[in-house]
Image (cartoon, rainbow, N blue to C red):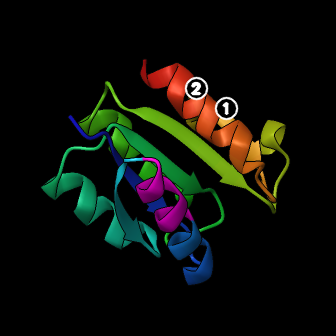
Amino acid sequence: MKRTVLVVDDEPSLNVTMRIILEAKGYGVAEAENAGQAIECIRRRKFDVLLADMNLPGDGGTVVRAMREQQPGSLIVVITGFIAPDAIPAPVRALVDEVLTKPTDIAHLLALLARRLS
């Protein structure tokens, strides 16, 4: 069964790049460019993984909270380039499984997904 990933970043090129890489590794991928789009995707479809930027139009923390509430068994990975991982508000950080910084080491991300989803 194909694992599904929701990629949420306000930089369209990053969404496309992640989709290409993840689909090449056998993942099903959906993309969103803001919190509103991401929350709508979360309401309509089940995902195994959320890969989300914290600095999003509409607030990345809102997306993390929605995913944890609606799909509690999902893996939540925050990828951020604008704030230090320890600067993520504690209530949001408590809902996140992993925090990665940009630029993201793709080999590390793929290994992380493989390990956490096995």
Q: Would you say residue 85 sits in the magenta stretch?
A: no
Q: Is residue 85 above or below residue 22?
A: above
Which quadrant is the N terminus positioned in?
top left
Position of 106 compared to 1: left or right? right
Q: Quadrant of residue 91?
A: top right
Quadrant, the C terminus: top left
Q: Whole-percent x and y of residue 87?
A: 81, 43
Estimate the spatial distance between the alpha carbons at disc 1 and disc 2, rounded to whole Å: 6 Å
106 vs 48, left or right, is right
Q: Residue furthest bottom?
A: 12
Q: Amino acid at mark 2?
A: Ala
* 23 magenta-colored: yes
Report if residue 89 is visible in the image.
no
Residue located at (54% from left, 59% from top): 21
Residue drawn at 33 percent across, 37 percent down: 48
Q: Which residues are magenta?
A: 18-25
Q: Residue at x 63, y 57 (%)?
A: 54
Q: Residue furthest left?
A: 44
Q: Circle 2 is placed at which residue position?
A: 94
Residue nearer the viewer, 68 or 6 = 6
Residue corresponding to mark 1: 90
Q: Main secondary structure of the magenta part?
A: helix
What kind of element bears circle 1? helix
Q: Could you tell me residue 52's position as x and y percent? A: 54, 54
Q: Tell me if 65 is positioned left or right of 42 in this view.
A: right
Amino acid found under the numbered disc labelled 1: Ala
Q: Secondary structure at mark 2?
A: loop
Pointer 1 and pointer 2: residues touching (CB < 8 Å)? yes
5 with respect to 83 (left or right): left
| Mark 1 surroundings: few (<14), some (14-19) or many (≥20) residues within 10 A | few
